[in-house]
Image: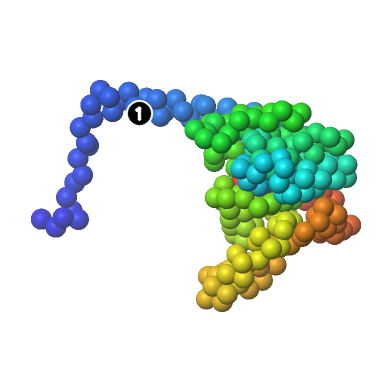
C-alpha cells in the first residue's frame, strides 16, 4: 500500500483531551467578546495614533520625556493616543495624551511579566489575546508612532508594515522616532531585504524617521495633506476585512 493512500484514523482521546477541547471551543466566545468590545468602544474615537515603545524605560530616561511630549502634542492636535496601557514608554504616551485635550486609551494585556496598567487612561480595555489586541491597534489608527523598544515593539512594527505592504490595511504614516536607535535596522533592511529582493525597494518609503515631537506631528499632517482622516469607500472595504 502506498503510504499516501493510508486512511488516517481518528486519534483516541482521553477525558482530559475532551475537557481541553471543550475549553478551547468556549474560548471562541471570549475572543468574540474582545473584538466586539474593542470595535464598539474605539470605532467612534477618530482620529487616533497608536504609539509603541519599551515597557522597561524608567521615568528619568530621556525617551520617557520625549514620548510624553510627542503624545501631548498629538493630543493637543486632536489625535486620541492609543498605547498598550502598560509601564515605561506606554505610560509616558498615555500620560502625555491624558494631559492633552484628546482621549488617552490603553489596550491592556494580561502578561506574566512587565505588564501592569498605568493610571493615565481615559478609556481602558483589557485583553487576554495578543491577536485581538493587535487588530485594535491597527483598525482605527490614522498613524503609527514607534519609539525605541524590544521584541513587542518590533512585532507591532513588522505587523503594520506587512499589512500595508500586502494591502490588508490602508496605508498610514509609520513614524520611527530616534534615528540613532533605528538607523542600523533600516540600513540592514535596505541592504538585505530590499537588496536581495525580499521586499521592493519602494517598500522602504513606508517608513518615516523623526527625532523631535514637532517632526512627528508635521509628518502625519503632511501625509494627509488635503485629504480627510476618515476612510474613503475603498479603504472602508479594506478595513472591513482586516
Residue picked out by circle 1: 21
26 up-or-down from 142: above or below? above
Q: In which quarter of the image is residue 18?
A: top left
Residue placed furthest toward the bottom: 195
Res 130 → quadrant: top right
Q: In this view, does 224 lie above or below 8?
A: below
Q: In which quarter of the image is residue 59?
A: top right
* Above or below for 121 versus 212: above
Residue 169: x, y in percent? 65, 52
Residue found at x 62% / y 50%: 149
The answer to whether residue 193 of the structure is visible from this angle is: yes
Disc 1 secondary structure class: helix
Q: Which of 201 and 167 is in front in this view?
A: 201
Disc 1 crowd, CA 10 A, few/some/many (<14, 14-19, 20+): few
Q: Identify the residue at image location x=68%, y=31%.
A: 118
Out of 234 and 99, give the one closest to the viewer: 99
Amino acid at each position: 500500500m502506498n503510504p499516501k493512500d493510508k486512511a488516517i484514523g481518528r486519534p483516541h482521546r482521553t477525558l482530559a483531551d475532551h475537557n481541553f477541547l471543550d475549553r478551547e471551543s468556549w474560548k471562541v466566545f471570549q475572543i468574540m467578546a474582545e473584538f466586539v468590545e474593542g470595535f464598539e468602544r474605539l470605532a467612534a474615537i477618530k482620529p487616533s495614533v497608536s504609539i509603541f515603545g519599551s515597557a522597561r524605560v524608567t521615568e528619568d530616561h530621556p525617551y520617557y520625556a520625549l514620548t510624553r511630549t510627542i503624545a501631548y502634542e498629538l493630543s493637543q492636535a486632536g489625535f486620541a493616543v492609543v498605547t498598550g496601557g502598560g509601564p515605561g514608554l506606554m505610560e509616558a504616551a498615555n500620560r502625555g495624551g491624558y494631559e492633552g485635550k484628546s482621549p488617552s486609551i490603553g489596550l491592556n494585556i494580561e502578561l506574566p511579566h512587565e505588564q501592569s496598567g498605568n493610571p493615565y487612561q481615559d478609556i481602558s480595555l483589557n485583553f487576554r489575546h495578543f491577536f485581538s489586541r493587535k487588530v485594535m491597534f491597527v483598525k482605527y489608527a490614522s498613524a503609527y508612532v514607534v519609539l525605541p523598544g524590544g521584541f513587542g515593539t518590533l512585532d507591532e512594527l513588522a505587523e503594520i508594515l506587512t499589512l500595508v505592504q500586502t494591502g490588508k490595511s490602508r496605508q498610514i504614516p509609520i513614524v520611527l522616532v530616534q534615528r540613532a536607535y533605528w538607523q542600523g535596522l533600516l540600513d540592514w533592511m535596505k541592504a538585505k531585504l530590499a537588496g536581495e529582493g525580499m521586499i521592493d525597494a519602494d517598500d522602504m518609503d513606508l517608513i518615516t524617521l523623526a527625532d523631535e515631537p514637532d517632526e512627528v506631528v508635521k509628518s502625519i499632517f503632511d501625509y494627509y495633506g488635503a485629504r480627510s482622516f476618515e476612510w474613503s469607500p475603498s479603504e472602508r472595504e479594506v478595513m472591513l476585512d482586516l
